[in-house]
Amino acid sequence: MGIGYDTVNQIMLAEVSIMVLVAILLGKAVTSAAAVGLGMPVGLIGPSLVLGAAVGGIFGVLIMAWHNTDVSLAFYVVLGMCAMMGAVLQAPLAALMAVMELTANTSIILPAMVIIVVATLVTSQVFKQRSVFIATLNTLGLQYPPSPVTLHLQRAGVTAIMDRSFTRLPPRISVQQARQTLAEQPNWIDIEDEHGEPNALLNPGDLAAFMEERGSQLQDDEQEVGLLQLPGQRMDVSTIGAEATVMQLQQLLDQSGTEACCVTRTTAPLIKPVVGVVTQNHIENYRNLTE
């Protein structure tokens, strides 16, 4: 359950039987995998060294029993540790440097290089496994190495692609307010809910078509126009801070299932005015420019 370095020392001193080594190997593998899978803040280098020490110890004991002679068990333990570290982390150079730091013996470099290269190649080429860290990133939905387009999306902020030509309106407005809004010629209409939060995004062209079609019936300025009821395509919106990147915006749209986003900037505590709107088309246009 702990780091296990005391167990490694006992294995090197041949103080652990082969049955206990098998139990340590199985138990450590299960507990380490469970801890990582549960998202606990644990490391991976320590468990890989313990598992490698157990495998090397088992191999050394079998060699001694097969040839009926005494061998340096610590030698096989160290080789097992570096092989497991190189295979799990897919970092052969780091594993070789770890062997040098643990042993301070240059005579072990050649066998360590051989076992590390074999373990790394078998893991990557035969079993098609990458580094455990990259596997963790893939599990979280992160790509490594990121594509050039992803890098561009991560480097650009939402304020660079957002549209600042918009107006915010309640769900129901007067005929005079609708005509005044069309006279201002905004690119987007942000429809607020009863709490003043962004609710939907409307193209002013739909409002203009509605006013033109119903113009003869909307002569009375006391009449109201329901922006959520008039014919047209309204996009559901989310909100995101102005400090976010385009990549974070794309992830938010994918997770929320919305088609547009209102960009807010904090000007005072609990005060976040909308400073721009971004749609999926804005992201696609920016992506096409970077490709």
Image (cartoon, rainbow, N blue to C red):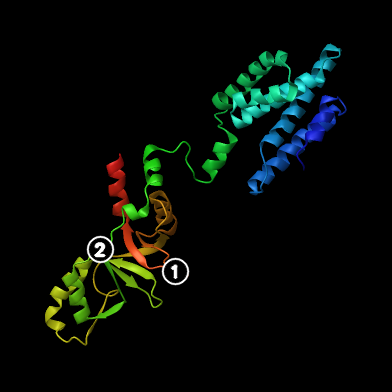
Mark 2 Cα within 10 Å, few/some/many (few <14, many 20+)? some
Q: Quadrant of the C terminus?
A: top left
Mark 2 lies on a secondary structure that is: loop
Name the residue beneath numbered marker 2.
165
Q: Amino acid at mark 2?
A: Ser
Q: Nearer the viewer, mark 2 or mark 1?
A: 1
The image quarter in which residue 191 lies: bottom left
Residue 129 in percent (x, y) is at 56, 31
- Tally the numbered discs: 2
Marking on residue 268: 1
Q: Measuring from the top left, give residue 150's x and y in whole percent.
A: 40, 42
* Up-down relation of residue 169 to residue 140 (above or below): below
Q: Is residue 151 left or right of residue 214?
A: right
Point 14% across, 84% down: residue = 219
Q: Crowding at label 1, few (<14), some or many (≥20) Cα neighbours within 10 Å?
A: few
At horizontal 60% and vertical 24% (from top left) the residue drawn is 93
Give residue 13's position: percent from left, percent from top: 85, 25
Quarter of the picture holding the N terminus? top right
Q: Residue furthest front?
A: 268
Q: CA distance from mark 2 to mark 1?
A: 23 Å
Specify whether 14 is left or right of 151: right
Decide: is 260 above or below 83: below
